[in-house]
Amino acid sequence: MRMPRVVLTGLLLTTVAVVGPALPTPAVAAALPYQDPALPVATRVDDLLARMTLDDKVGQMTQAERKVVTAADLTSYRLGSVLSGGGSAPSPNTPAAWADMYDGFQRGALATPLQIPIIYGIDAVHGNNNVYGSTIFPHNIGLGATRDPALVQRIGRATAEEVTGAGQDWTFAPCLCVARNDRWGRTYESFGETAELPSAMTTIIDGFQGTTLDGPASVLATAKHYLGDGGTTGGTDQGNTQISEAELRAIHLPPFAAAVDRGVGSVMISYSSFNGSRLHGHKYLITDVLKGELGFSGFVVSDWAAIDQLDGQRGFTQAEVVTAVNAGLDMLMVPTDWKTFVSYLRSAVQAGQIPMSRIDDANRRILTKKFELGLFERPYADRSYASTVGSADHRALARQAVRQSQVLLKNAGGVLPLAKTGGKIFVAGKNADDIGNQSGGWTLSWQGGSGNTVPGTSILTGIRSAVGGGTTVTYHRDGTGIDSSYRAAIAVVGETPYAEYSGDRTGSLGLDAADLATIARLRATGVPVIVVLVSGRPLDVAAEVGNWNALLAAWLPGSEGAGVADVLFGDHAPTGKLPMTWMQSAAQQPINDGDGKTPLFQYGYGLTYGTATR
């Protein structure tokens, strides 16, 4: 469990021996009621709230990015949270450096009069993907293809251990969007296009948070992005979801209801709008529906600088702060302009624009989770979990997830599985030997990147490890050098990394010219061609798939590419099922299960060796 740095014994604060840099003993010797872990959380919160000034309360509602805040700032402004944006990491990017950074910020928080610890947020969305050396699990679209909620829960637990090992205690995951248009650049962050599939996969919350929030390696989870971000017109990121409230409730709300039922600690609001109204100012959906109707008792956090978008003008105003907080936001992610936010929020309360009851409600929600996490008793990084970062057990779990996520869409003549022994196999394609490409966005950086960005196994390395004696594997990225002497050719093609903004596709959803040329070189020899598609969404391949012997959707498998080879060579039969309807052409977008359109492959489709699965 989280190793105690400072332990309450009776009414006295006592330090215990720890591994790592020495940390100061808190200044207060006598425990006040809120410092007594024997008291109920609600009692402790009430006692602490009664002691807090307006500055304390405003600070708790403020979240700043680590690059623009110091430990001294946390002391002076009494901030409640720090976060790392995508790719925002200490140097060196090691678990120990992350833990040292966390402890430094925590010392600043504990130097305040009331010694309220911070909570540190990070986008650990497919493993602790900002921390170098972490296990990188498949993105959610691949996990949706597994149809295995128990596996997803285990992935949440493994991720929580690796997050804890690097010192953080709050992840901005899971994404529970229901992606309804594959043009959207965040499609891969969705478990699937129907309400049922993301709802079932909320088991990952149980993995993140554990059986109790103060238990071993418990990390606060975040259900995001509330509400309807997967249903915007045209699949435009941060766009407008133009549907009826009945459809919003039927398709997009159920996963959040399921998350609330599982006790998710926080909910992040979407940048998008619902019928023209920005979600960050939507009091009905946040306060009435989420907190009232669904009974959500955790705290609501904004997305990155999102309150700046409420009036459509650059730079946020006091009026936007008033709108957002009165709508029900409890903690505001104001990464760079946090000092301006603090000033505006304080002034708004003093001017009576935001009632103190709303401020107290926000603080009560935030403080409750901090108490439940045990942060007041164990505020510093738990370095005992550092050994789990990228551990063999976690990589084995990721490999299992990869092979279970593979969806076999075509297998003409039973070309798969490939025999391990005898003859020659040719491998080509830009995604065959590129861990960065197979990991996708949100991997060490916001948009991700190509190349050997993280430790792991490429798909090519997995293929080479899978074959037996007497088999030669030849690789050329563009397919040059192949001839008819090879018994099979594997083309590993598809997308390169992206995240929101750059990930939206308004035009073609097909393979690029280089991929098509690579496959054409392989086909020209007459050798059976197996296409492995590495992508964050279904691609428009209907015009080409008839010329391929086999098609395997590998999604974005992460760091353990050997899981793809496990299926190609028959160590494990494919069991994955499509979490998204596969288009006949990009012109069909949006296309979803039950909408009457004829797909290339229907939602839930997947072959195994010998028969179809559904």
Image (cartoon, helix red, strand yellow):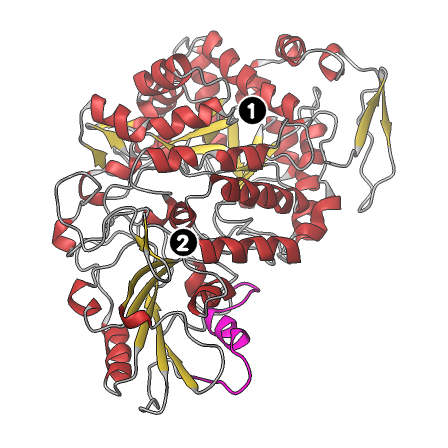
Dots 2 and 1: beta carbons under 8 Å?
Answer: no
Give the left or right position of residue 67, taking residue 13 as reference. Answer: left
Secondary structure at badge 1 equals helix
Instruction: Give the x, y percent position of residue 314.
Output: 30, 37
Label 2 sits on residue: 575
- Around disc 1, counting alpha carbons within 10 Å, would you say few (fewer than 14), some (14 to 19), or many (20 or more)? many
Instruction: Give the x, y percent position of residue 423.
Output: 44, 87
* Magenta-colored span: 453-475
Q: Is residue 36 magenta?
A: no
Based on the displayed image, in which of its 4 quarters is residue 414 positioned?
Answer: bottom left
Residue type, numbered disc 1: Gly
Residue type, numbered disc 2: Thr
Marking on residue 59 = 1
Instruction: Give the x, y percent position of residue 26.
Output: 79, 27
Instruction: Give the x, y percent position of residue 495.
Output: 33, 63
Secondary structure at badge 2 equals loop
Please say whether residue 500 is visible from this viewpoint: no
